[in-house]
Image (tube, rainbow, N blue to C red):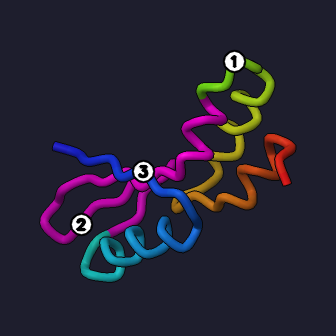
Amino acid sequence: VSFQVYTDSQEETDRYWNAIVNNGGSENVCSWCRDKYGLHWQIVPRVLMEAVSSSDRSVAKRAMEAMVTMTKIDIAKIEAAIGRH
């Protein structure tokens, strides 16, 4: 079983991520983490989902390339990768 949580800001992303990881959980790649009970969570900023599903394939590619270098998603880095400021 896994859960996805869509977030609207870095603060919200950090809040969910930290609540899971700092309470006996663990980090994983590409916005995935596991809680202390072994359940998997993907904490996903909406800007990331919009970017990777963009009809502009170069935007989608740059977003994906940025994402795979991260554990918790850094929205500013995603926005920089896709040319949004």
Decide which of 8, 43 is in the foreground and name it. 8
Identify the disc placed on residue 32.
Answer: none
Please, is residue 22 above or below residue 33 in the view? below
Identify the secondary structure beneath mark 3. Answer: strand
Label 1: how many Cα within 10 Å (few below 14, some 14–19, many 20+): few
Q: Residue at x 28, y 61 (%)?
A: 34
Residue 55 is labelled as: 1
Callout 3, which amino acid?
Answer: Tyr
Residue 30 among magenta residues: yes
Q: Residue at x 66, y 58 (%)?
A: 75
Q: Secondary structure at mark 2?
A: loop
Please report the residue visible at 26 percent of the width from the left and 53 percent of the height from the top.
40
Residue that numbered label 3 is attached to: 6
**Image-quadrant location for residue 82:** top right
Residue 20, percent from left and from top:
31, 72
User: Which residue is nearer to you in this view: 10 or 40?
Assistant: 10
- Is label 1 in contact with label 3 (beta carbons under 8 Å)? no
Q: At label 1, which amino acid type do we have?
A: Ser
Q: Which mark is residue 35?
A: 2
Which residue, as the protein is rendered here, is positioned at the far front?
8
* Tag nearer the camera, 3 or 2: 3
Examine the structure image and report whether residue 67 is included in the region drawn in magenta.
no
Of pointers 1 and 3, the one earlier in the residue sequence: 3
Quadrant where the image shows the C terminus = bottom right
**Secondary structure under badge 1?**
loop
In the rendered structure, the answer to whether residue 77 lies left or right of residue 43 reads: right
Q: Magenta segment range?
A: 26-52
Query: Which quarter of the rendering shows the N terminus?
Result: top left
Q: Earlier in the sequence, mark 2 or mark 1?
A: 2
